[in-house]
Amino acid sequence: MKIDLRPIYFIIGLLLMTLALGMLLPMFVDLAQGNPDWQVFMLSSGVTIFIASALILAGHTREKMFFSIRQGFIMATFSWLVMTIFAALPFAFSELDMSYTDAFFEAMSGITTTGSTVITGLDYAPPGLLLWRALLQWLGGIGIIVMAVAIMPMLHVGGMQLFKVEAFETSDKALPKAAQISASISAIYVGLTAIWAIGLWLAGMTPFEAVNHAMTTIATGGFSTSDGSIGHFNSGSIDLLITLGMIVGSLPFMLYLRMLRGNFQAIMADTQVQWFLVIVFLLIFFATAFLWIQEGYDPIQSLRFGAFNVVSIITGTGYASMDYQLWGHFAWPIFFFIMFIGGCSGSTTCGIKIFRFQVLYAAAETQIKRLLEPHGVFIPYYNRRPIPDEVMFSVLGFFFIFGVCFALLAMALGMMGLDYITAISSAATALANVGPALGDTAGPSGNFQTLPDGAKWLMASGMLLGRLELFTILVLFMPTFWRG
């Protein structure tokens, strides 16, 4: 059966039009500051509008649009890819004189909320370009929330069907339609961004810095306006606000919606949130204790630096308030492994996600019980509901594919000439969309500028693969997908 591409053209065209209009904001900022890069954003916006209009016209139909599962897979992958191609234009033509490889890497890192960068001298970069980086992460953050709520459950990707019932089919659903849910969640997202922008401004940032960091905090993206990241500000109140913002961005936005509609216990009653907060607080406790006892920091500083950097990495935000690699051998394995965890499903975070670890734990617990009592009947549960077999198999498949992709990407980066630590941590940070890697080159005090172009393209592919939950892209390489 031939796949009807018209709805896909139409949706991608609308998304590109949104991107093009977004380019006008940094254009006006540069124009107001007298920076010549405003012309770059104007031309990039014009090119993007032209292509977007062509796609909208090609996809427009008077018939009511329906999306099949195969169309959903194509739209999910190509919408992010096409948007990145055009989002890279302002970087490529800016006064920073970046190659298109670097521009594409930066745009992919932004729109997938990864936070890895190839730009140095951020403190002196054009303000429009800094705003564009933050805006990309902000748009990517709300984009992944909408996908997690409205698209991924429909596609049955990596166990995401577990949330389909919660979102649309229960009698106590928050709102009746996917469009209404998406609009309401977007309003919450904007509101939280505004609250954090005001808070960071009051804490000592300039209004421009506050808006940029509010967008990248709630989006758990990690792009900063300074090479020193959040350490540049050296402020305990800013560290605290951003730490809380990263946690807020890591919780399911559907639960915020339920809270606003009267179910005030929605967040704390959710087992995924409970697991996430327990893991975060335990890691903060160990990091704080280590800094206090082993490194000689005072208790307040230990808590401040430990909490900020642990939350930043586990949520995949990628900010740094200091080079945590200097904490000693404790830091390297801890920060490497927590890269993979991520936050809750339906949030702006990345990584494997807490619910998959819950499903894996439930499966292991059930298996142990069956070994002890072979004739007993044991059912794995998630959020006090039985886990369907298809969800179990989907999650187990996700873990396997994630491990294979990580190994292949790490080996490929090693073949590009990267040392062992840089290759393996860069593969991890790309697939888990975290931001900084480990080592002298790409650690929290470095960036990815010196990597060969081939490594940058590999990492950009890994970012997209990780952001779209692996299967969404890999299924497109199956010949049976296109044969129908």
Image: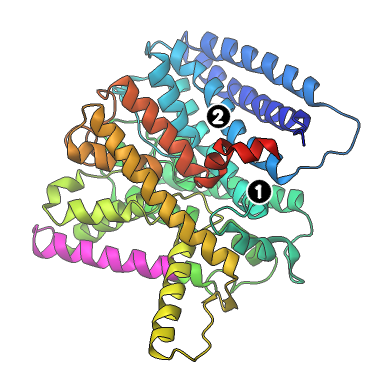
Compared with 182, 265 (above or below) is below
- The picture places residue 475, in percent across and down from the top left corner, at 57, 42
Instruction: Please tell me whether the stretch drawn in magenta is mainly helix, strand or loop.
Output: helix
Q: Is residue 372 left or right of residue 2?
A: left
* Magenta residue span: 275-298
- The picture places residue 419, in percent across and down from the top left corner, at 17, 34
Q: Amino acid at mark 2?
A: Leu
Compared with 172, 237 (above or below) is above
- The residue wearing badge 2 is 81
Q: Is residue 138 left or right of residue 435?
A: right
Among numbered discs 1 and 2, the one appearing first in the sequence: 2
Q: Amino acid at mark 1?
A: Ile
Residue at 49% across, 21% down: 88
Q: Is residue 285 magenta?
A: yes
Quarter residue 346 falls in = bottom right
The label number, if any, that marks residue 151 in the structure image: 1
- The picture places residue 318, in percent across and down from the top left corner, at 35, 43
- Which residue is outermost to the right? 62
Secondary structure of the residue carrying numbered label 2: helix
- Structural crowding at the residue carrying mark 1, measured as other residues with C-alpha within 10 Å and reported as few (<14), some (14–19) or many (≥20): many
Q: Is residue 121 visible?
A: yes
Nearest the camera: 12 or 1? 1
Q: CA distance from mark 1 to mark 2?
A: 17 Å
Q: Which quadrant is home to the C terminus?
A: top right
Q: Are marks 1 and 2 in contact (CB under 8 Å)?
A: no
Secondary structure of the residue carrying numbered label 1: helix
- The picture places residue 439, in percent across and down from the top left corner, at 18, 39
